[in-house]
């Protein structure tokens, strides 16, 4: 019983901490006007964060061991190329994911 | 009377279209959240916890990496302050997400608390890049996207905790769908805006953090670093005045665009 209670309290603490990080900017700037410098970088944040998320997805890649991140970089290249060419989000995403699954499940770059 | 009925029917139909549109937008997140959620559920199950906890955590916490961290801390027998501090540090990046959504979220009405609660990396990426279908209510569309993503995550984690050990699907590589989603959304951002400096800042900050910091810390550090670069350029660049004027113009445009959904939601409210 104490174990259950402890687990529920733990979940509540993690949930509150997570929500706190998400609500923070809205609490700070909910009623008053954000400083000018903020509103200019506000517009530049989404493109920067999205590209950082792409780079973040590569965080666990072993660059110095075979296959040297080639499947990841190759697939990202294909997705980007496809998207610049056709600009069809579903096509780019699913073709890319399918390609990546084939590459890693069949060890296509194992010759490296 | 009949007119009213027809109007209501029309509205319901419009909502259905909006929902289907959100469903289509979130398909990549579905394909990413199911295997990731399953991995989390499987991990929690392996640590000896009932599947109901996987459900509760995904329902109430709803943070991918945060929940993986929680399993590790649970296994290590950490105390409550450790849980709180580790979660705050790991998810601090979300504060930057909100920072760029202040304006977008300023007129979404009563769904705002939920949208803030459900602001994961993937939902943030979709909300900042996807356009609201013409004629649709912004608050409704955003709510559908956020709630659908949330639902996928809960479904994945319960599935993983309940039958993760029974299933032996080869889903290796499927989580790459989220990487592909981010790549596509980054390119969409590139098409939608004429500013190029954020991409340069991202490459600089991202590659630096990738080399210097551990995988667990790199995202927050790279976002802080990139934001500092953006601020630094804004403060230093006197020669940027011209560029600023350019972005100033796009500001007013987005203002005008944002004003329309307000009217929509106002009408809906009445």
Image: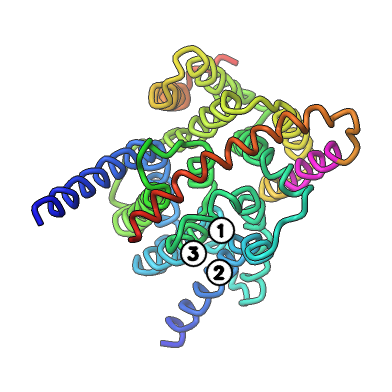
Q: Is residue B169 left or right of residue B120?
A: left
Q: Which residue is mark 3?
A: B113
Residue depicted at x 42% and y 47% = B138
Chain ID at mark 1: B
User: Is residue B87 part of the magenta span, yes or no?
Assistant: no
x, y percentage for residue A58? 62, 34
Q: Which residue is mark 2?
A: A14
Quadrant for the C terminus of chain A, please. Answer: top right
Considering only vertical position in the picture, is A62 above or below B37? Answer: above
| Residues drawn in magenta | B221-234
Q: Which residue is mark 1?
A: B66
Question: Can I make out residue B86 in this image?
Answer: no
x, y percentage for residue A68? 64, 24
- Kindly report the distance in space between the C-alpha atoms of the residues bearing marks 1 and 3: 20 Å
x, y percentage for residue B179? 52, 34
x, y percentage for residue A82? 48, 15
Residue depicted at x 39% and y 26% = A90
Q: Secondary structure at mark 2?
A: helix
């Amino acid at each position: 019983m104490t174990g259950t209670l402890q687990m529920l309290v733990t979940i509540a603490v993690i949930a509150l901490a997570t929500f706190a990080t998400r609500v923070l900017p809205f609490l700070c700037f909910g009623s008053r006007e954000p400083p000018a410098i903020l509103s200019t970088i506000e517009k530049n944040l989404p493109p920067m964060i999205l590209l950082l998320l792409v780079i973040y997805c590569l965080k666990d890649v072993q660059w110095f061991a075979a296959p040297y991140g080639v499947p990841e970089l190759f697939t990202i290249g294909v997705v980007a190329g496809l998207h610049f060419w056709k600009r069809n989000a579903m096509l780019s995403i699913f073709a890319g994911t399918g390609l990546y699954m084939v590459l890693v499940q069949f060890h296509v770059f194992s010759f490296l | 009377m009949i007119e009213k009925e027809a109007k209501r029917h029309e509205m319901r139909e419009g909502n259905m279209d909006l929902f289907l549109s959100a469903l289509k937008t979130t398909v990549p997140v579905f394909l990413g959240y199911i295997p990731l959620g399953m991995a989390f559920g499987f991990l929690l199950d392996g640590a000896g916890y009932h599947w109901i906890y996987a459900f509760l955590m995904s329902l109430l916490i709803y943070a991918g990496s945060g929940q993986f961290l929680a399993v590790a801390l649970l296994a290590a027998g950490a105390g409550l302050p450790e849980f709180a501090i580790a979660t705050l540090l790991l998810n601090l990046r979300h504060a930057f997400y909100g920072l760029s959504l202040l304006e977008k979220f300023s007129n979404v009405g009563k769904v705002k608390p939920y949208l803030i609660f459900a602001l994961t990396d993937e939902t943030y990426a979709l909300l900042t890049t996807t356009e609201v279908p013409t004629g649709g209510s912004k608050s409704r569309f955003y709510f559908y996207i956020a709630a659908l993503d949330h639902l996928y995550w809960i479904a994945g984690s319960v599935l993983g905790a309940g039958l993760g050990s029974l299933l032996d699907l080869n889903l290796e590589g499927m989580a790459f769908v989220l990487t592909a989603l981010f790549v596509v959304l980054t390119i969409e951002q590139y098409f939608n805006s004429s500013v190029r400096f954020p991409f340069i800042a991202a490459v600089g900050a991202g590659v630096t953090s990738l080399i210097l910091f551990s995988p667990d810390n790199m995202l927050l550090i790279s976002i802080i670093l990139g934001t500092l670069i953006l601020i630094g350029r804004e403060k230093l660049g006197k020669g940027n005045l011209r560029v600023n004027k350019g972005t100033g113009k796009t500001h007013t445009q987005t203002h005008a665009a944002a004003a329309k959904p307000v009217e929509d939601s106002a009408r809906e409210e009445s």
